[in-house]
Image: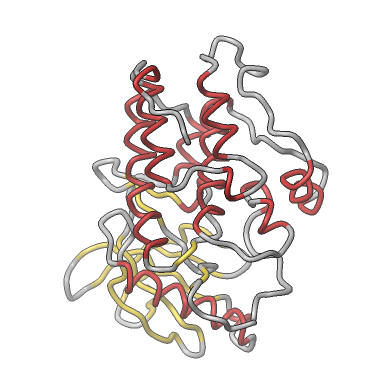
Amino acid sequence: MAKIGRYKIIEELGKGEMASVYLARDPFIKREVAIKVLAYELTQDPLFIKFFYQEAEAIASLEHPTIVPIYDFGLHGVQPYIVMRYMSNGSLKRRLKRRGLNRQELCDLMGRLAEGLDEAHALGIVHRDVKPSNIMFNQTNDAFLTDFGLAKFTQRKTGMTGTLLVGTPKYMSPEQAQRLQVDGRSDIYALGVILYLILTGRHPYRASSPARTASAHVHAPIPSVRAIIPELPAMWDEIIGRALAKLPEDRYESTQALARDVALATRGQWHLRVAPV
């Protein structure tokens, strides 16, 4: 059986352009873990090495119960790897392919993500790649944020990513798409895209290429969820409109404020909502 460090590899869980993730077993503690290994061809690129080490640093500095924790960090030859808690119930992306979410599941999901993201933002960390494949579920179906490899530490000035288009175009805020300065409101925007996807089964902006999709976030009007599903109450368009506002200052002031409105809407208590000043 192949090994990474002391960990015995069971199977490959997924492979991306930057890294592969494996299910493994720790023979000392006798538990299953997930191991993320930087792709071999990127080990000579200082920018991707930076992203990888940055992920370990970001998660270690957060230590929040809604963020997948790190157990270990090491080198497999020249490839750095991160050992994390194994999330046995897969990703939100996989779940949405199988079925939608009911009202309580939506409330629970948004509430947990808001807790983790607001904690990160308070520490000056912007995730920059919030999307369904980076939201995982444990054995009791609690949601966790993962993959902080593209996180930005807003209190630092490294200058290394200023010319890069960082993130995933389908979930990219207008300021990310324009390579402008970002803060936590970019993550709020991405959470709004996820909410739109959960409500309608579609992404708000779809184009023929990643570049055109990113451009649509900047220039295209905010779509109506009721144009796709007319039976949805009008309040959902108001929530989506505020979450996906083109200007960061027009969005929710925190992810918990967005989650609070989602909870009020799903429970039919929208009339209790305090209108934004």
> Is 173 located above or below residue 223 in the figure?
below
User: Residue 142: horizontal and vertical position, in percent?
Assistant: 29, 44
Q: Is the image coloured rainbow, by chain, by secondary structure, or in one colour?
A: secondary structure
Quick one: quadrant of the N terminus?
A: bottom left
User: Does residue 86 appear to the left or right of 225 in the view shown?
Assistant: left
Q: From this viewpoint, which residue is outermost toward the left?
A: 29
Residue at image point 62% right, 17% down: 226
Q: In which quarter of the image is residue 272?
A: top left
Residue at image point 60% right, 15% down: 229
User: Does residue 204 appear to the left or right of 194 in the view shown?
Assistant: right
User: Does residue 217 appear to the left or right of 82 in the view shown?
Assistant: right
User: Residue 140: horizontal and vertical position, in percent?
Assistant: 24, 42
Q: In which quarter of the image is residue 257?
A: top left
> Is 177 located above or below residue 91 in the figure?
below
Q: Which of 175 and 51 is in front in this view?
A: 175
Q: Nearer the viewer, residue 74 or 269?
A: 269
User: Residue 99: horizontal and vertical position, in percent?
Assistant: 47, 27
> Is 79 located above or below residue 237 in the figure?
below
User: Does residue 65 appear to the left or right of 92 in the view shown?
Assistant: left
Residue at image point 62% right, 60% down: 167
Residue at image point 49% right, 61% down: 127
User: Residue 131: horizontal and vertical position, in percent?
Assistant: 53, 49
Q: From this viewpoint, which residue is outermost toward the front?
A: 277
Q: In which quarter of the image is residue 251?
A: top right
Q: From this viewpoint, which residue is outermost toward the top?
A: 231
